Amino acid sequence: MQVRPTAPILPPSNIQGNALMVVIAIMAFLACLTLGAVSMVQTTAAGWQSQISREITIQIKPDENLDMNKALVRAKDLALTFVGTRDGQIMDEDATARLLEPWLGTGLDLKDLPVPRLVIITIDETNPPDFAAMRDLLKSEVPQAFLDDHRTWVDRLVSMARTTVLIGFGILVLVFSAMVLTVVFATRGALSGNRRIIEVLHFVGAEGSFVAQEFQKHFLKISLKGAATGGLLAAAVFALAGLWQNKMLATPQSDQASALFGTFQIGFMGYLGIFATMIVIALLTTLTARLTVMRAIYEIDLIRSDPTRTEGLPND
């Protein structure tokens, strides 16, 4: 004698399920895209911070009674006497002119312009020199010199990175909240359409956990398909952006994109984060569906146990 397999409470495929899968796919795509973008910006900001922290700049303003070349050499030698400095480089006139080309054009004669000259000092990030003492020494020996340790820019970059991370987490919270509400409404709709079946199963002895498990399986399949679709699309976007950037190397568009956003490569940890986001979305959807079903069954038991609330209900 063959045992006939029981049919699922919910149909494996319907319009509501397909619509929910599309919504979950969109939510997963946005969540993974936000996570990858936050990771990329944070990596870029860390790179900027590291580059800025490795160097300090000494600016020497021109003066009528100042021998600029001697002042540049003197400032460089004074800076290199401090522990924590590694190397020094005087930016020559040609390099200074190239820095000013975007604003003043080509063919500049710096002797006719009151343009400060620069000395770039490379420092040890792990053991930086005493900037205050260096600034005082330069002021006493070369009054026209000004030390810029880039602390202001570093602090701004750190603040920007933290703000970006907070904004990214805020967007993730909004996406997850919208997804939870969508699953709640979808589960409520499925319960409403199958309420009579659920009541019959429940009152002939089916436990609430059994009914919740059936809904849980149904929404787990939908959420896995939707989360996988959205996550793979987000990963494809980053992969294609990285390929485009590699293909467009040494072009103005690629150089500007690299300067602003760094590379579009999110690396192994980025793709691992996308995969983890897909799993979290699937589990969150499943848990939401289960809790919603258990709450609905509790409400059914509450109504049935209260005679005053069952008055006026149709008899089956």
Image (cartoon, rainbow, N blue to C red):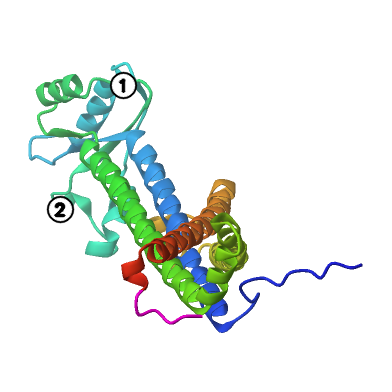
- Tell me the quarter of the picture where residue 88 sits: top left
- Tell me the quarter of the picture where residue 194 sits: bottom right
> Does residue 244 appear to the left or right of 53 in the view shown?
right
Q: Residue at x 50, y 64 (%)?
A: 28
Question: Upstream in the sequence, badge 2 or badge 1?
Answer: 1
- Tell me the quarter of the picture where residue 139 sits: top left
Q: Which residues are magenta?
A: 311-316
Badge number at residue 245: none
- C-alpha gap between disc 2 and disc 1: 29 Å
Instruction: Relative to 45, say whether 210 is above or below.
Output: below
Residue position for label 1: 80
Label 2 CA crowd tier, 10 Å (few <14, some 14–19, many 20+): few
Residue 213 placement (x, y as % from top left): 60, 58
Residue 48 placement (x, y as % from top left): 37, 45
Q: Residue at x 44, y 61 (%)?
A: 301
Q: Nearest the camera: 312 or 206?
A: 312
Residue 255 appears anywhere in the view: no
Residue 285 appears anywhere in the view: yes
Residue position for label 2: 113
Residue 275 placement (x, y as % from top left): 58, 54
